[in-house]
Amino acid sequence: MGGDQSEKAARFRALHQAPGAFLIANAWDGGSARILAGLGFQAIATSSGAQAGTLGKRDGAVSRDEALAHCRVIVDATDLPVSADLERGFGDTPEIVAETIRRAAAIGLVGASIEDAKAERGAGVYDIGLATERVTAAVEAARASGVAFVLTGRAEGLLRGSKDVDDIIKRLQAYEKAGADVLMAPGLPDLASVRAVCSAVTKPFNFMVGIPGKSFSVAELQAAGVKRISLATSLYKAAITGMIDAAREAKDKGTFGYLDRSIPTQDFNAFMRG
């Protein structure tokens, strides 16, 4: 598994240039990455929330070393291109962000996102000047990696209490000008705002599925101009929901009906063989 990084980077970049929208599925370990590859997805992303869950931590409490080690497991598990959710780059300064991207490329990742939210809960986002400098540093590190690394600039204001879509657009335009290959703004409230964002930028836009009431169908998102659709923590949450339901049935009812709903062992083993 693993495969040639340059070839995977070229495949990943080509997905952003092909007609229509594509789904990128977020894995949380090597096993889930192999299952998603076996189901026919063309690329995989990591999820900071799912990653934290596997370590028994809350989102945002994972160190850079822990995050990159987790990403390396997923990179090595399949031959698919893997892009990482690297949160804010694990530091405030552009220099730290650049080092994070350099290390990300060194472990075989072919893409990553850098967001403009501050580390502290409730602290909001960086001012647009510093946020843009951070994206610029990430882009420069990506370009120096020697592979066609796809850098995503994320505007996080809608997840940090803002309702100002115009500010989100202003930020995404700044990140685009700074060289980001893909743009992302989690939490857009409706399809009208998705269309407004997509029409305001020229680079591919990534829509994040996973927020109840603010997730739309692939057909709707493609019609609105979205190029990439990521599943964020939604698959991990669905898996954990299944585990909780099964465990509650066993503990509270003393029955094991969930066994009849589970994937057969031979099918599971087939996925793990790749």
Image (spheres, rainbow, N blue to C red):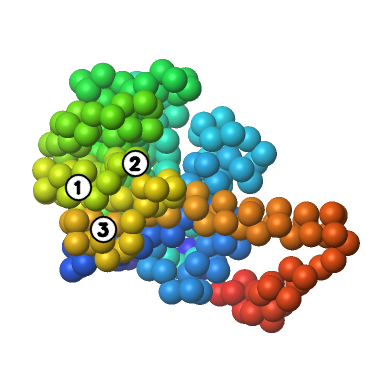
State the mark number for residue 221: 3
Q: In this view, does 226 lie above or below 154?
A: below
Residue 243: image location, x then y, percent: 70, 57
In this figure, which residue is indicated by the disc labeled 1? 192
Circle 3 or circle 1, nearest the eye: 1
- Disc 3 packing (10 Å; few <14; some 14–19; many ≥20): many
Between the C-alphas of marks 1 and 2, the distance is: 14 Å
What number is the disc on residue 134? none
User: Could you tell me which secondary element the residue under label 1 belongs to?
Assistant: helix
Quick one: quadrant of the C terminus?
A: bottom right
| Label 2 or label 3, whichever comes before in sequence order | 2
Q: Name the residue under label 2.
A: 186
Q: In this view, does 247 lie to the left or right of 190?
A: right
The amino acid sitting under disc 2 is Pro
Identify residue type, mark 3: Leu
- Circle nearer the N terminus (3, 1): 1
Give me the residue at 43% from left, 74% from top: 40
